[in-house]
Image: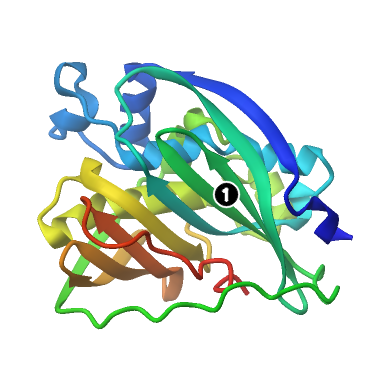
Amino acid sequence: MLTRFAGVDLGTRRVGYTDRDVILYALAVGADADDLDLIFEDRLHVLPTFAMTLGLWAADAASAAGAFEPESALHGAQRLVVHRRLPPEAQFDVRGRVDAVWDKGRSAVLDIVAESEYFTATYSIFLPGQGGFGGQRGPARTERPAGEEKWTADIATGRDQAALYRLTGDRHLIHVDPVAAQSAGFPRPILHGLCTLGIVARGLAAAVDAQPWELSALSARFSSPVFPGDVLSVRADTVGRTVAFDVGSAGATVLADGEAVFGSEGNAPGAGVSDSVR
């Protein structure tokens, strides 16, 4: 039964990167030659969402331990809390664990946590058809505060975006191989959910007149796939430096129940993120 994985320690991994990795990540989530603070080593700031690439190994470790089969699982939601800003180059330990197993009725959700002195990242893995085992459903979804201002933006993705983002570490075949994508039920390779979220998080800074490296917390649910070349239509409400958002593309909502906090203002978002995965 899935509940036996709740609380399982996935070990500790030493992660390391250089400014080259930081720059590559920024380019992979849409930074360009004008974004010198993100792509030029002499004045480099690290996008906080880069942390999500450093903890992804924990989900792979949970799969290797028998918690789920990658072919029958979906990345349902993501949460990131930033404790300290990442330096341009670093080596540090990241600890992994299966934080919780939720019974959603017809499906199940595993919350897999990777944490370090710099960040805590939670990868919610959605397992269709594996619920109904009598477990807890998980926290209720929290109500979002009414926004004071409306903000919208259209952000184009590139046809080569998934091919580039794969170089940050996630080389799942459905993002590059048409045969693998079709076997998974997609007409062609899809963009990584974490790439979509990284692109949007970078853009959301403009909604509250912040810098993208000031992001302190982020959460969203992945509700539909994005294909390289799609345009992301971002709709947001703001309260102070907190942004509630969703994202549409090609007539579908692709990111739902999103929340981002910039700077130290506000509480970490996404307390109900697991419950929002259906």
Quadrant location of the N terminus in the rendered image: bottom right
Can you say whether 255 is above or below 115 in the image?
Answer: below
Residue closer to the observer: 70 or 125: 125
**Quarter-of-image position of residue 220:** bottom left
State the SS at label 1: loop
Quadrant location of the C terminus in the rendered image: bottom right
Residue, far right: 1
Can you say whether 139 is above or below 40 in the image?
Answer: below
**Quarter-of-image position of residue 46:** top left
Spot occupied by residue 202 in the image (x, y as percentages of width and height) = 27, 48
**Quarter-of-image position of residue 267:** bottom left
Residue that mark 1 sits on: 189
Q: Is residue 58 left or right of residue 108?
A: left
Residue closer to the observer: 247 or 9: 9
Amino acid at dot 1: Pro
Q: Is residue 107 left or right of residue 145?
A: right
Task: Please say whether residue 33 is visible from this viewpoint.
Answer: no
Spot occupied by residue 10 in the image (x, y as percentages of width and height) = 71, 36
Residue closer to the observer: 42 or 196: 42
Report the coloring of the rendering: rainbow
Tell me what residue is drawn at x 42 percent, y 76 percent. Answer: 251
Residue, far left: 209
Tell me what residue is drawn at x 84 percent, y 45 percent. Answer: 66
Residue closer to the observer: 184 or 115: 115
